């Protein structure tokens, strides 16, 4: 059985090693998804596992009042440098102090929390009519093809670890949410993208499966990817998704 990602603290804690690169190279979320979440003035948002504040900044710029919670001091520092109010804690240990929110967001991070405990806590934080939103960018290479790029990982990572974990695409997601009294809806936006030069490789090296490789393996992986990508960069598609979950009266 695969190990639940939220118990793999070695991978969860790896992002802070490259906090600046993470903020620079990770993709932003499509504006249409952000605007859909900030659908009126004065929306109060809690960004859980905010990382360097990528989603926080986008939500703030769309007009929301944002509070971020992030356990890693290095990631939180980058978010704060971008003008985000951050409280450093795991979501499990974070104290809301009677604060409530119209929207709780987990952007590319729900797989790092214990899902059942998180859903119970979120339900206590939401104001009437409030929602939980899981945001995900899933970048799929088109040229070179994913199968070709996958060859670079051979003998360095197991097949199941070659691409990032993402709770939004977990087969059990709907069942887990429904068991806690949430109804869910899913929206997706397809964005063509081009990564010039080494930009694709730089993004790959912000993912925890790569960051937890030893130095020799990282150097070998970068060399292999550089040979495959060449000077042409990577054409890709971003299958950006938001899962919007609304708790029932029983859940909240």
Image (cartoon, rainbow, N blue to C red):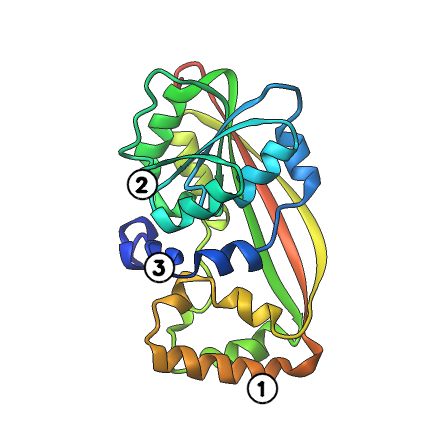
Sequence-first tag of 3 and 2: 3
C-alpha distance separating marks 3 and 1: 26 Å
* Residue in the image at 60% along x and 83% along y: 228
Percent coordinates x, y for residue 140 in the rendering: 61, 63
- Which residue does the numbered mark 1 point to in the structure image? 227
The 10 Å Cα crowd at callout 1, few under 14, some 14 to 19, many 20 or more, is few
Sequence-first tag of 3 and 1: 3
C-alpha distance separating marks 2 and 1: 39 Å
* Residue in the image at 31% along x and 39% along y: 90
Say if residue 161 shows up in the picture: no
The reply to whether the C-beta atoms of the residues labelled 3 and 2 are less than 8 Å apart is: no
C-alpha distance separating marks 3 and 2: 18 Å
Is 75 situated above or below 237?
A: above
The quarter of the rendered structure image containing the N terminus is: bottom left
- Which residue does the numbered mark 2 point to in the structure image? 114
The 10 Å Cα crowd at callout 3, few under 14, some 14 to 19, many 20 or more, is some
The quarter of the rendered structure image containing the C terminus is: top left
* Residue in the image at 56% along x and 57% along y: 24
- Which residue does the numbered mark 3 point to in the structure image? 14
Percent coordinates x, y for residue 59 in the rendering: 59, 34
């Amino acid at each position: 059985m695969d190990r639940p990602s939220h118990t793999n603290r070695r991978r969860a804690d790896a992002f802070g090693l490259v906090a600046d690169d993470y903020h620079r190279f990770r993709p932003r979320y499509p504006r249409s998804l952000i605007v859909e979440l900030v659908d009126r003035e004065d929306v109060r948002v809690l960004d859980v596992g905010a990382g360097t504040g990528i989603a926080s900044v986008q939500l703030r710029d769309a007009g929301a009042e944002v509070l971020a919670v992030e356990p890693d001091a290095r990631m939180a520092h980058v978010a704060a440098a971008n003008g985000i109010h951050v409280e450093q804690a795991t979501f499990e240990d974070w104290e809301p102090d009677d604060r409530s929110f119209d929207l709780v967001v987990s952007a590319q991070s729900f797989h790092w929390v214990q899902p059942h405990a998180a859903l119970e806590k979120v339900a206590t934080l939401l104001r009437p009519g409030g929602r939980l939103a899981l945001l995900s960018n899933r970048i799929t290479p088109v040229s070179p093809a994913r199968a070709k790029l996958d060859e670079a990982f051979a003998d360095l990572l197991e097949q199941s670890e070659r691409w990032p974990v993402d709770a939004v695409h977990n087969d059990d997601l709907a069942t887990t949410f429904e068991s806690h009294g949430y109804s869910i809806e899913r929206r997706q936006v397809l964005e063509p993208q081009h990564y010039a030069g080494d930009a694709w490789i730089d993004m790959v090296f912000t993912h925890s499966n790569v960051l937890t490789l030893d130095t020799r393996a990282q150097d070998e992986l970068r060399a292999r990817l550089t040979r495959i990508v060449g000077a042409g960069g990577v054409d890709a598609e971003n299958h950006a998704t938001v899962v919007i979950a609304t708790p029932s009266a029983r859940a909240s």
